[in-house]
Amino acid sequence: MEAKELFSIRLKELLKEKKISQRELAKKANLSDAYISQLLMVKKTSTIKVLKQIADALDVFPSYFIENGAEVSIFLRENKRLSGEDIKAVEAFIEFLMEKKEGERR
């Protein structure tokens, strides 16, 4: 499964769980309704900035949308604006957040 497909699936699940419409999400994330629609239909790939805006609007960590480390790498590499060093830094930060979240659950 491609990263953008996983993102779409997770986003749909979260919208349903939180009972939030596409339009409400677009407004909260300061994005267009059309852009959210394209993400949900897997016609667009989210940038890191948009991923963070959506995660913040839905009150989840950005890592929620990414299943595991392998998919993190795929997702980041699809966003070609990041260097290899940038990708490693983002992956390390996501791992940190995931460990922090695990600690909060205990």
Image (cartoon, grey):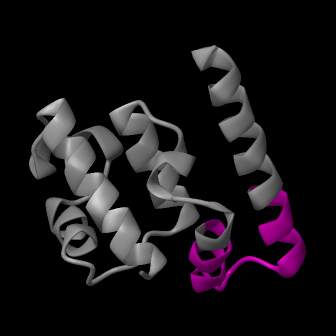
> Can you say which quadrant of the picture contains the N terminus?
bottom left
53, 89: nearer the viewer: 89
The residue lying at 51 percent from left, 59 percent from top is: 66
Residue at 32% across, 47% down = 30
Q: In which quarter of the image is residue 72?
A: bottom right
Left or right: residue 40 compared with residue 85: left
Please state the horizontal and vertical placement of residue 31, each as a whole percent of the image: 29, 55
Question: Is the C terminus in the top left, top right, bottom left or bottom right quadrant?
Answer: top right
User: Quick one: 50 or 92, which is closer to the camera?
Assistant: 92
Left or right placement of residue 100 versus residue 36 in this view: right
Residue 20 vs 33, above or below: the answer is above
Q: Position of residue 14 (x, y in %)?
A: 26, 43
- When the figure is inspected, residue 11 is found, relative to residue 25, above or below; the finding is below
Residue that sits furthest to the front in the current view:
106
Q: Is residue 36 left or right of residue 19?
A: right
Residue 62 picture location, percent across and down:
53, 47
Q: Which of 13 and 47 is in front in this view?
A: 13
Q: Which residue: 44% across, 43% down?
A: 55
Q: Does the magenta stretch include residue 77?
A: yes
Residue segment shown in magenta: 72-90
Determine whether 14 is above or below 77 in the image: above
Q: How many labels does the image show?
A: 0
Secondary structure of the magenta portion, mostly? helix
Q: Which residue is rendered at x = 43% and y = 69% of the image?
A: 46
Q: In which quarter of the image is residue 50?
A: bottom left
Residue sitting farthest toward the right? 85
| x, y percent for residue 18 | 20, 32
